[in-house]
Structure formats: C-alpha cells, structure tokens
Image (cartoon, rainbow, N blue to C red):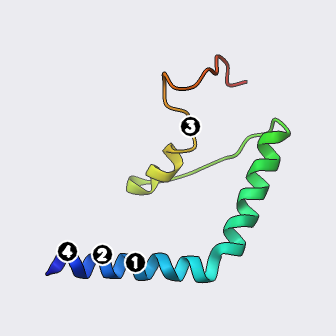
Amino acid sequence: MLAKTWLKNAREVMDRLENTQMDNIYQAAELMAESIECGRWVHTFGCGHSTLPIEEMYPRIGICGVSSYD
C-alpha cells in the first residue's frame, strides 16, 4: 500500500535526522533562545510548505497575552 510506504520512508528520514542532527538542533535552539532572551530577533524563512514550521514560531491570536511585539 502506497500510504504505508510513504510513512515508512518518512520515519526513516526522521530517524536519520534524529541520529545525525540532534547536536546541531540543540545548538540552534540555544542560539535562538539566547537571542530572544536578550531581546534580539530570530530571523526565519520558508517558501511553500516549508513555511509551516516557521509559522509555529509565532503565537496564535487569542491564546497569548502579548500586547506588543517590540
């Protein structure tokens, strides 16, 4: 079945990312957290469907008590 093949391939990609890139992911997270903590910007970019993870960087309207993004 095509769906099961797709899921198997997707899991393999995610496993490969986890096994080879976790140190880089943690390092990037630390850099972004430090920047936010110091009141600096975190610049993000996405094109097409790759914008979906970038959209997760921003609070959804109505669930966050932030009144200013300065």
59 displayed left or right of 66: left
Q: Earlier in the sequence, mark 4 or mark 3?
A: 4
The residue to which callout 4 is attached is: 3
In the displayed image of the protein, which residue is found farthest to the left?
1
Q: CA distance from mark 2 to mark 1?
A: 6 Å
Task: Report the amino acid beneath label 1.
Answer: Arg
What residue do we see at 70% from left, 45% from top?
42
Disc 2 vs disc 1: Cβ atoms closer than 8 Å?
Answer: yes
Front residue of this view, candidates 20 and 50? 20
Disc 2 vs disc 4: Cβ atoms closer than 8 Å?
Answer: yes
Task: Report the amino acid beneath label 3.
Answer: Tyr
The x, y position of residue 32, in whole percent, is 74, 51
The x, y position of residue 50, in whole percent, is 44, 57
Task: Report the amino acid beneath label 4.
Answer: Ala
The residue to which callout 1 is attached is: 11
Secondary structure state at the residue bearing disc 1: helix
Q: Earlier in the sequence, mark 2 or mark 3?
A: 2
The residue to which callout 3 is attached is: 58
The x, y position of residue 44, in whole percent, is 61, 49
Q: Is residue 50 above or below residue 55?
A: below
